[in-house]
Image: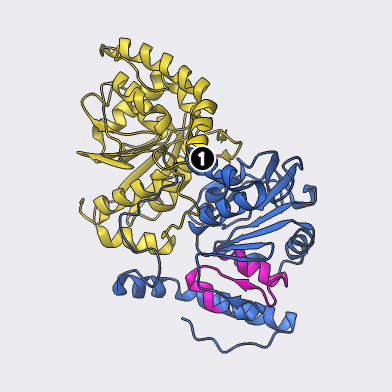
Chain colours: A yellow, B blue
Amino acid sequence: MISHDTHLHIGSLLFEGVDQIDLTGPFEVLSRIPNSTYRLYGKTAEPVRDLKGLRLTPDATLADAPPLDVLHVPGGFGQEALMEDADVLAWINRQAAGAHSVFSVCTGALLCGAAGLLKDRRATTHWASFHLLPFFGAIPVNQRVVVDGNWIFAAGVTAGIDGALRLAAELRGDEAAQAIQLYMVYAPEPPFDSGTPETAPAAILAQARNSVRGITAQREQTARRVAVRLGIDVPVVGGD
Amino acid sequence: MISHDTHLHIGSLLFEGVDQIDLTGPFEVLSRIPNSTYRLYGKTAEPVRDLKGLRLTPDATLADAPPLDVLHVPGGFGQEALMEDADVLAWINRQAAGAHSVFSVCTGALLCGAAGLLKDRRATTHWASFHLLPFFGAIPVNQRVVVDGNWIFAAGVTAGIDGALRLAAELRGDEAAQAIQLYMVYAPEPPFDSGTPETAPAAILAQARNSVRGITAQREQTARRVAVRLGIDVPVVGGD
């Protein structure tokens, strides 16, 4: 836990094609961390659209970001377009190097991997991309939230809420996190038990795997190129 | 359940001072309802800011909205400024009258109440405003999600995710909702059990109640005026 007297600069990377709740789930928590400034940073200051069209506007550009105490990297298919973007990867790399905490949600982990930051790190990501983690040298851990040193990885999408509360506790103590949880009435009651590949009905999982097959194949091709660039032995992939 | 062949128009009311996750939690679900068009409607087409500064942009104005099959009304303290806004209340009233489903999240219920739509209806809202429901003639039900006929009420903030999945199941069947749940990996693991007044540590609840006292008092004054306008006997208030 950092001293409560230390003002924290918290920043999220915002990009075209983000999955909005990878950002907005954590936003609800990160914007309420005591004694902090929280901002969204984009390649430009122009609005971007999430996967499904939600328009979100950065507060500032990457170049304008101060050294961040907390770096949050969300995911969503738009991450693919940044996997070989030298400017964005350098920014992630530089910010992560100086940060107290790095927080990755969903396929934000792949971006951190492309920045060369996942080598020998215990990590997780969305179930559809989980088998790609070894391409970045990461050790895949099938948990909703994985903590490895000063890194927090949240698996898919809504896991970002759980990860952000863990991060809030790490930064400002359990009571601060509990106060935020009470405000946001986070006592979830999912109406079905279909939130993971292990619990979803088989037919639903098969359909879901099929619907992401094209995207996953594209991600795998990119991951192979990244592995070569990073000098990581390309693993045999067993996922689909 | 409506016929799967019927294209659905789904719309959320977006306003300055919304609590962003009241909108963005459901967005993740509503934007994935099969055979539908989902849009955000504002008083103007200009961007608004949520409580904590997130900039969100409407897709169109209230005047441009088609008759909606599903009306979603989020909350957040910005709702106060609309409680006596004749244009917005008339829009809610007209859209609700023709809708297959109305979905209120958090203090969105107070807005629906100000539109005169909660009389004799079983409803819920954020715990800090729960005691105000009788001012609108509603029957308060202390549940996370309350279904009353074609209305779905989600209590506070993140309850909108649970409510939206219930709504998805109502509109397109359980399997459609389960597929969305799997995509968004909604198998929550809150790190603390502090999400409701009943479970939060007493000191945290006391602090939270104190921090919303001013806002709640203001909401109560407004609710009294609304009750007079709607001809509802002003109840004795026991909350704080």
For badge 1, the amino acid type reads Gln
Q: How many marks?
A: 1
Looking at the picture, does residue B93 appear above or below residue A105?
below
Q: Position of residue B62 (x, y in %)?
A: 75, 52
For image coordinates 31% across by 32% down, the residue present is A95
Q: Is residue A69 visible?
A: no
Q: Is residue A179 visible?
A: yes
Q: Position of residue B83 (x, y in %)?
A: 67, 69
Q: Would you identify the image quadrant in which residue B221 lies?
A: bottom right
Q: Nearer the viewer, residue B44 or B71?
A: B71
Left or right of A164? Residue B103 is right
Q: Give the chain of mark 1.
A: A
Label 1: state its secondary structure.
helix
Q: Nearer the viewer, residue A167 or A137?
A: A137
Left or right of B90? Residue A129 is left
Quadrant (top left/top right/bottom left/bottom right) for the C terminus of chain A: top left
Left or right of A92? Residue B75 is right
Left or right of B232? Residue B184 is left
For image coordinates 30% across by 50% down, the residue present is A166
Residue pushed farthest front?
A202
Looking at the picture, does residue A131 appear above or below residue A153?
above
For image coordinates 35% across by 25% down, the residue present is A131
Q: Residues within 10 Å of mark 1 (few under 14, many from 20)?
A: many
Which residue is labeled 1 in the image? A20
Q: Position of residue B2 (x, y in %)?
A: 73, 49
Q: Nearer the viewer, residue A218 or A14?
A: A218
In reply to whether residue B13 is colored magenta, the answer given is: no
In reply to whether residue B110 is colored magenta, the answer given is: yes
Q: Position of residue B3 (x, y in %)?
A: 74, 45
Write the start and end of the magenta stretch as one range: B106-131
